[in-house]
Amino acid sequence: MSAFALEPSLVEVLREQLPAVAEHTVAAVTAEVPEYADAFAGEMGATIQGAVQMALGGFLRLASQPGDSTPLGPARDGAYALGRGEARGGRTADALLAAYRVGARVAWRELSATAVDGGLPAETVAQFAELVFAYIDELSAASVAGHADELATSGRVRQLYRERLGLALLSGTSLPALQAMAERADWAPPQDLTVVLIPSARNRDVLPLLDGRTLSVPGDLVGLADADVLLAPDTRRVLLRSLRGRAAVVGPTRPWTAAASSYARAARLVDRVAGSEPVDTEAHLTTLVLTADAEALADLRAQALAPLADLRPATAARLAETLRSWLLHHGRREEVAADLHVHAQTVRYRMTQLRELYGERLADPDVVLQLTIAMAVDPST
């Protein structure tokens, strides 16, 4: 700040004008800055006028004590708190700076007029202007810092609340608890949610592509090693289009309170999250159903293939492969041969062997159903 100092007598004259200057400053801000048009009505207007008057009083103390920056401290602290309050009130830093510009103009116009009338020499008016605007620059910088700090702090807190909400959704928390958590997180529940698993390293790349209400949960919080969980409100069509060309597993769409079921299904295919295209669980329902109980499927397969147990492993594998293809192609020999890349006569020969091993059971619908289920999922894939 400048070492320029006002005469004590002039400071007293200026101090008498502070209530009027503060009133005119607030009136100009509300008239010229749209964001503040209705902000200072009633009791709030009187409070703001008092704050402006106190800030201007700090300026006069500073102007009457050259070299002493002590009066600047409380004013700077007040400006910082103002910036934080404006951020909490939803007003932007641009609106705050616009208010400072208007306030500086009004304060300078009225204070300078009073100073000249009070005997301030014309040649020192420029120094007075420098002091006024340097002071207001200090306050506006402190307010902007407070505004930025509040946004950063509130953003971190909101993100923490939303992360906790995401975890609660994945764990199937009750509706009243979810509603309370959503309100605390400032999150408007959509009608539906779809769980998407993505590689953890791609979270920042993918999240901006989705609806702004998408919740993100770090995978390590739910036991996933290299994948994060997103809960997206996007429609399924939009979601799959947004993820095109990116590794992801997309669960089914569910009501937002039932997102846990979407996660449970997507997690079953988490090993496919490393591909180059999104994996839609809706296209893998058969596999998901058949592998819901892997141990039971293995037991069923062993039971179904029991007639092959005494064969050499290579022979048993060839016959099992042929039986699987025969079941899936409804016994159409040419299609089985094309599927296995063998001659139709080879298929005939192998099926003769299988009929000898299974006997009449291959004509039993219950046995055919058992074999079809047991062998529907190729264990080699």
Image: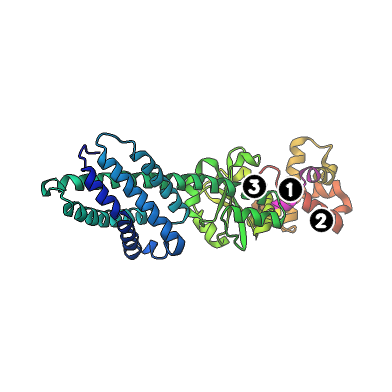
Identity of the amino acid at label 3? Leu
Q: Earlier in the sequence, mark 2 or mark 1?
A: 1
Q: Quadrant of the N terminus?
A: top left
Q: Majority secondary structure of the magenta segment? A: helix
Q: Residue furthest left?
A: 123
Q: Quadrant of residue 217?
A: top right
- Which residue is tagged 3? 167
Give the residues in magenta.
287-298
Check the image and name the residue furthest to the right: 360
Residue at figure coordinates x 46%, y 56% from the top left: 89
Disc sitting over residue 220 in the figure: none
Residue 342 horizontal/vertical position (percent):
66, 48
Q: Nearer the viewer, residue 84 or 369?
A: 84
* Separation of marks 3 and 1 at Cα, in angstroms: 26 Å
In the rendered image, which residue does mark 1 sit on? Answer: 291
Which one is nearer the viewer's eye here, 15 or 353? 15
Left/right of residue 366 with respect to residue 316 in the rendered view = right
Residue located at (58% from left, 44% from top): 228
* Rendered position, 228 above or below 109: above
Find out whether residue 250 is within the magenta segment: no
Q: Which residue is mark 2?
A: 369
Q: What kind of residue is marked 1?
A: Thr
Q: Residues at badges 2 and 3 in contact (C-beta under 8 Å)?
A: no
Where residue 380 appears, x then y in whole percent?
68, 42
x, y percent for residue 171:
70, 48
Q: Is residue 45 left or right of residue 269?
A: left
Disc 2 versus disc 1: distance between alpha carbons? 16 Å
**Label 2 crowd (10 A; few <14 / some 14-19 / many >=20):** few
Residue 21 appears in which quarter of the rendering?
Answer: bottom left
Magenta-span inclusion, residue 288: yes
